[in-house]
Amino acid sequence: MEKISVAIRFRPSAAGDPPADRHWRVQDKSISLVGPGSGVSFAFDHVFDPSYTNAMVYDLLIKSIIQAAVDGFNGTAFAYGQTSSGKTFTMSGSEEEPGIIPLAVEDVFRTTKMTTDREFLIRVSYMEIYNEEINDLLTLGNQKLPIHESLERGFFVAGLREEIVNSAEQVFELLKHGEANRHFGETNMNARSSRSHTIFRMVIESSKRNPMNLGDVSNTDAIRVSVLNLVDLAGSERIAKTGAGGVRLKEGKHINKSLMILGNVINKLSESGRQRGHIPYRDSKLTRILQPALGGNSKTSIICTVAPEEVHIEETRGTLQFASRAKRITNCAQVNEILTDAALLKRQKLEIEELRRKLQGSHSEILEQVILKQRNDMHKSELERERLAMELEEERKARETLELCIKEQQRKIQNLSSLSISSYNTSISTQQKVNSTIMFDELSVSRSDVFRTPNFKAMADDFVVKRPSSFKTVDSNPILENFDNTADEDLWMQLNKGCITDLDTLQMTPNMKHQSLPSLEMSLEPSVDDKISSKRHHSLETDCGFDREQLEALREKCTIRERECSLLREEKASLVEALSLSKQDNEQFRAQKEELLKELNTEKQKMKELKEEIRQFSLAFHQREGLLTSIYTKSKAMMENLNVSKVSIPEVCDS
Ligand code: ADP
Ligand code: MG
């Protein structure tokens, strides 16, 4: 159990506008209010005056959450405060002074690179809650997304695009893209941005790297999955102050509603355990998404931004009160380790890792990109399949309900038909015996039929309309007698619902029967009765036809979805095929490489042999050369000797 970290950040006051610091006093980490409501002092984890930069705020308040997220803990950081108090500046920052989101993204990739004993898969999404609707900021037109809940994934936004990323630059590109989508078609960007909440989310999956057997994930390997939410909330100012009207008022109401529910959730959570009661997370999309961050399994930091000018003093008080209540919330964060296939890393790892290992030798960045693209394609088709399956399920349920409805309508029509026939018969027999004493038995068949028909239990009024057909001549209380034999408890209930006072009247004064039910008597006329029945019959048939049309439309939709589903399946199959083809290519590539290497080795060997031959040849050459040189020298010396002796011989002869 640990408390949520809460910090207050004052933005610099607008030029020429002195800060209203006479209304409060900052002492180290606490702020006390001066003036009305004075004596109240709030203590926080940090109070950042305007001299603190985004980097300092990040280091002091957020860095630990980011490190923990890499280690498998869920993390959330959000900025709360009135419009223009510095929420966006804190979360996104500027070119010169990057905010918490870019600093966190860089930190995540830096830390994952340094954690060499684990392998990571990171995916990001970026959404906006505007007018209580969730819009995907990474895919234009992907709007009004629903929140679903599943055992494995908890709460999740169905249909939200998630992109697998492997560098901070890639994330920055996506964020830029998201911002562009956010402002698409907006005439007043600032107005919109201060009226919507944005949630940037990173899902970090990691598994232990096994140096002996890279890429081999057995079923017992636990995968850590953590979710990091970085949230820039809409402005918390009161509508009355902004003077908003029309569309702005509607937006304001939605912001106020979701911020109000956020406030409610925080108020409830700040109460001690026993008084707490129900926490209304489900009342708004924002609180459903932030549920783990508030009192759940997450490490959470809140930066409450404050505009220091005098005009904003009321909002500042509100922000400080919100912050001090948030400070009381305790969370219970733990490492999320899962063994099931819910981890994407696990599902993709075997296929991708094998490919990666093969490609690693070729040092190709392009091939890394190919892997990333394939991972993303696989993930996308998985998400799409999941969304379609969900839609299909919903449509199936709707179809079942409609079918039931149609069956019920048909049953009603049948009953009405039989009713009109029986009422027609009854009225004829009543007319025939109008002057004679009517024996109860004569009517008992039709009446007991009426009583026995289960559908009449659901139509007390119709039943009551039929009842007086016997009153004309019977002066005792026929209904009660009859009920003794045929009516069950349900029927009694229905009857009582329909005309409880009339029944009492009947029991006490039989003569008043006609007076108390004049309109019912009118309905005895077969023609009127028939008219009512046929009218009802007609309207039910129309309903039925309409339901049938709806069912047909749903069936068509279902078929389209099923077709889409099978197309996706085909797409997946073709992706898998492409993957296996690229595996084959890679295999060929490797075989070629090996062949080339072999050839190279042979060539090398040949070259070595040639060199050896050349060496031996040159050795022999040198030997020969030496020999020849010595022969030459010797023969030269001999020639010289010979010449000398040639010259001296005649001298000798001459003498
Ligand atoms: P919010 O998102 O709360 O509506 P912004 O972040 O847009 O408010 O801030 C309003 C203005 O104040 C912006 O021009 C922003 O650059 C400026 N600003 C806010 N906080 C700081 C700060 N700490 N240092 C410098 N400028 C700030
Ligand atoms: Mg903003």
Image (spheres, rainbow, N blue to C red):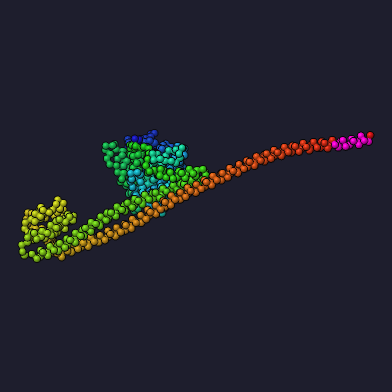
Q: Is residue 310 above or below residue 513?
A: above
**Residue 29 among magenta residues:** no
Q: Who's the residue at 45% across and 50% down the image?
A: 578
Tell me the quarter of the picture where residue 49 sits: top left
Which x, y percent locates residue 163? 42, 47
Residue that extends furthest to the front in the rendered view of this protein: 653
> Could you say which is closer to the camera, residue 368 or residue 274?
368
> Could you say which is closer to the camera, residue 223 or residue 153?
223
Which x, y percent locates residue 247? 35, 53
> Could you say which is closer to the camera, residue 610 or residue 297?
610
Which x, y percent locates residue 423? 14, 62
Q: Would you say the magenta stretch is mainly helix, strand or loop?
A: helix
Q: Give left or right: position of 159 versus 646.
A: left
Q: Is residue 617 above or below residue 134?
A: above
Residue that extends furthest to the right in the rendered view of this protein: 655
Q: Who's the residue at 62% across and 41% down the image?
A: 608
Range shown magenta: 642-654
Q: Can residue 212 be seen in the rendering of this structure? A: yes
Tell me the quarter of the picture where residue 351 sits: top left
Q: Can residue 23 be seen in the rendering of this structure? A: no
